[in-house]
Image (cartoon, helix red, strand yellow):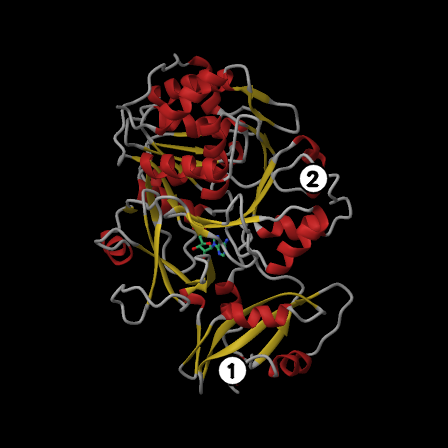
Amino acid sequence: MNHNLFHTFATKMQERGTANFITTPEGKTYTYADALARTGRIAGALQELGVQPGDRVAVQVDKSPEAILLYLATLRIGAVYLPLNTGYTADEIGYFLGDAEPALFVCQPVALEAAKAIAAETNCPCVKTLGTNADGSLMDAVEKAAAYDGIEQRAEDDLAAILYTSGTTGRSKGAMLTHKNLGSNSKSLAEAWRFTEKDRLIHALPIFHTHGLFVACNVILVTGASLYFMSRFDVDAIIAAMPEGTSLMGVPTFYTRLLQDDRLTPELTANMRLFTSGSAPLTAETHQQFEQRTGHAILERYGMTETNMNTSNPYDGDRIAGTVGLPLPGVEIRVTNPEAGDHQPLPQGEIGMLEVRGPNVFKGYWRMPEKTKAELLEDGFFVTGDLALVDERGYVQIVGRDKDLVISGGFNVYPKEVEQVIDAMPEVMESAVIGVSHPDFGEGVTAVVVLLPGQKLEEADVVKALAGHLAKFKQPKRVFFVDALPRNTMGKVQKKQLRDQYKDIYQNA
Ligand code: AMP
């Protein structure tokens, strides 16, 4: 049996024939039959360029339907797809190419000269380009290549992709994902979220990350549904697409931005059946506001690069704001005491380290056996680095990253708890709570606050407002006001950046 994930996709692609697979707002379209034929041509070109099964194909290109076809063609020939964030600099790319040793690096046409220099330094044998208009030297090679009609034989545990983690501490790690990891998760999500051939997913996420690439595209491919493929998130374009769309997968900032627009109404979203959110916490407030405005309860789910998706709020049943739902079928979770390090489950309801096991959990970090051993335990559980609790109904609540925990005067302060109280102030739009080195307390709880337009608050107002709600050790010692929190493209607040920015504030305190 061929466990190549492309085999599953190809069966669906044949079945769906002239049905639409992908369309862009600019009118570019591929039917499933077109897409299948095109992956054969790209696969042929990759082989002629010397890419062998198991080789890595590193790709740093702008979002386009052809980039998805390149991903599919890479799977088809049994090679390993390695997408890279378009925001990475030459130095970062040098690290990735040196570490992953790809047989081919596909870059943006404008980046060719820089890419060639990096490739020469890192002994990458081949560099090609791919533009957003189906242009570039890779596409020239595709025009000349003979199509490859086969599907390379792969075992379940063979690698399908390597995704580098965003790496907020230390070097980025390459998460090795197998055909089984991706295949099992896409089927499980398609079922859990009731995707069918009739679905039309509005796709506005980047495709170098697990959310936009695997969650969104693989779910569509396993069900034979269609993608409405936007180059980026744009409120006007999303609003224009909703009457024809059935579903949207978003990060929380999609929803906060949509909520700022008066055109978001029950009528606009009448054809939509599902809005999902993930990659960063969705506040209960945003969840509730969205439901009030549209009648749709956003379905929040939780996952990460290393594990694909782990938990999801139910399709039928209560979608509880502020939770990431229940473990997906086949996924086991446990919450353990990170200090004890014994990986024994804590009593239900206690906060601890979330660990997960299942067919979705990756194979390890590329060429990092020590890191793999530390985080992927012998019994198969992966230590996620997220602090969480499971409530009495079995719903998981993510409290934050372990490394964002603030330890002040020996007490644990969970930033989310403090952020929730600050966010509840009527003047506040959002906040981030961080730990900053403090001579007396080890770390001082520090709040960075964004006010709603036209609102005014002083540091003392926030401190006073929190006094009755939080124990003294949890109250921020300093409060700063900013226009916006630093976020990455997936909407995650960059707490490391904030910690760096405020690192000296208590030094002369
Ligand atoms: P990444 O590997 O870039 O996908 O980041 C994974 C991390 O994002 C997780 O470990 C969580 O810390 C965070 N994350 C993902 N989904 C959620 C969610 N629904 N709520 C809170 N945090 C989330």
Picture quadrant of residue 396: bottom left
From the top left corner, tell me how far across and down residue 283 is, in percent: 59, 59
Extreme residue in the left direction = 378
Seen in the picture, residue 204 relative to 463 is either above or below; the reply is above
Give the mark toward the camera: 1 or 2: 2
Amino acid carrying label 1: it is Tyr
Residue 229 vs residue 382, the one in the foreground: 382
The residue that appears at 23% across and 51% down in the rendered structure is: 369
Residue 186 vs residue 40, the one in the foreground: 186
Seen in the picture, residue 143 relative to 127 is either above or below; the reply is above
Amino acid carrying label 2: it is Thr
Alpha carbons under labels 1 and 2: distance apart = 49 Å
The residue that appears at 55% across and 30% down in the rendered structure is: 64
Query: Seen in the image, is 106 located left or right of residue 103?
Result: right
Q: Residues within 10 Å of mark 2 (few under 14, many from 20)?
A: many
Lower sequence index among marks 1 and 2: 2
Q: Residues within 10 Å of mark 1 (few under 14, many from 20)?
A: some
Seen in the picture, residue 320 relative to 339 is either above or below; the reply is above
From the top left corner, tell me how far across and down residue 358 is, in percent: 32, 46
Does mark 1's beta carbon lie closer than 8 Å to ligand 1?
Answer: no
The answer to whether residue 85 shows anywhere in this view is no
Q: Which mark is residue 506?
A: 1
Determine whether the residue tagged by mark 2 lies in a helix, strand or loop: loop
Determine whether the residue tagged by mark 1 lies in a helix, strand or loop: loop
Seen in the picture, residue 380 relative to 148 is either above or below; the reply is below
Query: Seen in the image, is 209 located left or right of residue 373?
Result: right
The answer to whether residue 41 shows anywhere in this view is yes
From the top left corner, tell me how far across and down residue 90 is, in percent: 45, 46
From the top left corner, tell me how far across and down residue 169 is, in percent: 40, 60
Q: Which residue is mark 2?
A: 269
